[in-house]
């Protein structure tokens, strides 16, 4: 396995299946492969610079969730680097949402703020607004690429 070269606060690029790129930030990292990321559009025709992503903020993300680090360690997702003044409080570890289709129950899934691979607890929540939010699960790199391709399906800018 290649050497892990990313850290919390690093910005990176995700290639889209339709051509172009999305960007992401590693908001929390577990060296055993679980990362919490925030992902952003629009689709870009060229790899952006760190200066290009400096104004992006957590509420603007088109996708938030835990994902595998394989795209990063294999070099398929280029790492742009880390902006000065990284502040993890601006990129919180949200409660993730798990919906049980069979029972109709919804849970907020809480992970450790320092380790997105460490499950702390699950809390059943009433249906409605509580069901909205980032979904629980561990996304593979290919899955992230496909979802972002669908979400950002307009032409690269």
Image (tube, rainbow, N blue to C red):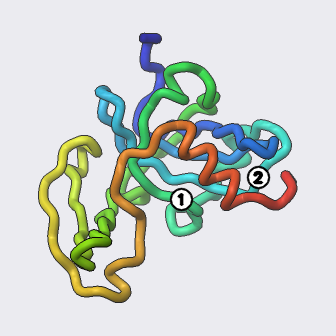
Q: Position of residue 116 (x, y in %)?
A: 28, 45
Query: Disc 2 versus disc 1: distance between alpha carbons?
Result: 13 Å
Quadrant of the rendered image containing residue 11 = top right
In this figure, which residue is indicated by the disc labeled 1? 63
In this figure, which residue is indicated by the disc labeled 2? 43
Task: Report the front residue among 33 and 83.
Answer: 33
Task: Report the front residue among 21 and 153.
Answer: 153
Q: Position of residue 123 (x, y in %)?
A: 15, 71
Residue at 60% of width from left, 53% of height from top?
147
> Is residue 100 positioned above or below 6 on the image?
below
Quadrant of the rendered image containing residue 20 = top right
For this view, does 120 lie left or right of residue 134?
left
Residue at 43% of width from left, 19% of height from top?
4
Circle 2 crowding by C-alpha within 10 Å: few under 14, some 14–19, many from 20: many
> Is residue 28 positioned above or below 93 on the image?
above
Q: Position of residue 23 (x, y in %)?
A: 64, 46
Say what secondary structure mark 1 lies in: strand
């Amino acid at each position: 396995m290649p050497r892990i070269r990313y850290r919390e606060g690093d910005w990176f690029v995700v290639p889209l299946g339709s051509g172009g790129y999305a960007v992401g930030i590693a908001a929390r990292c577990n060296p055993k492969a679980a990362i919490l990321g925030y992902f952003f559009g629009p689709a870009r025709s060229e790899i952006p610079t760190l200066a290009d992503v400096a104004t992006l903020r957590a509420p603007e993300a088109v996708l938030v969730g835990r994902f595998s680090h394989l795209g990063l360690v294999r070099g398929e997702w280029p790492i742009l680097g880390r902006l000065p003044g990284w502040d993890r409080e601006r990129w919180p570890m949200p409660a993730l949402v798990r919906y049980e289709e069979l029972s109709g129950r919804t849970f907020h899934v809480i992970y450790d703020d320092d380790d997105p691979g460490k499950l702390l607890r699950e809390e059943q929540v009433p249906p409605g607004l509580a069901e909205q939010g980032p979904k629980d699960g561990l996304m593979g790199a290919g899955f992230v690429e496909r979802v972002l391709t669908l979400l950002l399906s307009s032409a690269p800018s």
